Image (spheres, grey):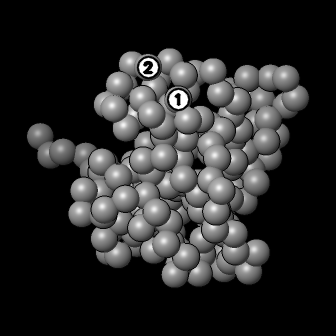
Amino acid sequence: MEAIREAAANGNEKEKGRLKQTLPAITPSACHSEGQTRSPENLEALTGFLQADIDIDKNPHLPDADTVKQALTQNPVIAFAALSTSGQGVWALIPIAYAESAFKRQFEQLKKDFEQTGINLDAVNGGNPQHLRLYSFDAEPYINPEAKTYTRIAPKPKPPQPQPD
């Protein structure tokens, strides 16, 4: 972990990427058949948690990951928040109400809600329940066993309208 964080701090993206490939990983939002790949046909169940990823490079107005983590402690829907693998971001778990029926739409609404507080979520990580979360270590993670379930949902996208000839 220290070697990855050192490579990240030194801007050595190639080495950081190489080292990250050696780490174990989980899918916090989904359970898959034992020993199987993360393909949709091996998906057994959703956990009811959505993962959010907040990178400092996409939030230049925030001084560091610890500041982000501290800000998340004020949000009642955050069940868990910790430093990311590189130490240059934070990942969080949010219990959601509609994992089975509206996972992606709940993530889209959560992104909008976070943007209103000045925090930009990674648009890629989180919207797919099968996204991996690499092992990371945080000596002082935030844990909230009383987190409120996030119930907001983005509207369904409108179907494309036929174009008049």
User: Which mark is nearer the camera, 2 or 1?
Assistant: 1
Between 22 and 117, the residue placed more toward the observer is: 22
What label sits on residue 15 in the rendered view?
2
The disc, 2 or 1, on the residue closer to the chain's N-terminal end is 1
Say which element carries label 2.
Answer: helix
Q: What residue type is labelled 1?
A: Ala
* Residue 98, horizontal then vertical, whole percent: 66, 65
CB under 8 Å between discs 2 and 1: yes
In screen coordinates, is 29 left or right of 119? right
> Can residue 27 be seen?
yes
> Can residue 151 be seen?
no
- Say if 59 sits above or below 26 in the image: below
- Distance from Cα at disc 2 to Cα at disc 1: 9 Å
- Determine the residue positioned at 66% across, 80% down: 148
From the image, which quarter does the C terminus lie in?
A: top left
In screen coordinates, is 42 left or right of 54? right
Between 22 and 31, the residue placed more toward the observer is: 22
| Residue 2 quadrant | top right
- Say if 20 sits above or below 54 in the image: above
* Residue 74, horizontal then vertical, whole percent: 52, 81
- Say if 85 sits above or below 117 in the image: above
**Number of numbered markers:** 2
- Say if 21 sits above or below 139 in the image: above
| Residue 128 quadrant | top right
| Residue 82 quadrant | bottom right
The residue tagged 1 is 3
Q: How crowded is mark 2: few (under 14 residues within 10 Å), some or many (20 or more)?
A: some
Between 117 and 5, the residue placed more toward the observer is: 5
Q: Which amino acid does label 2 sit on?
A: Glu
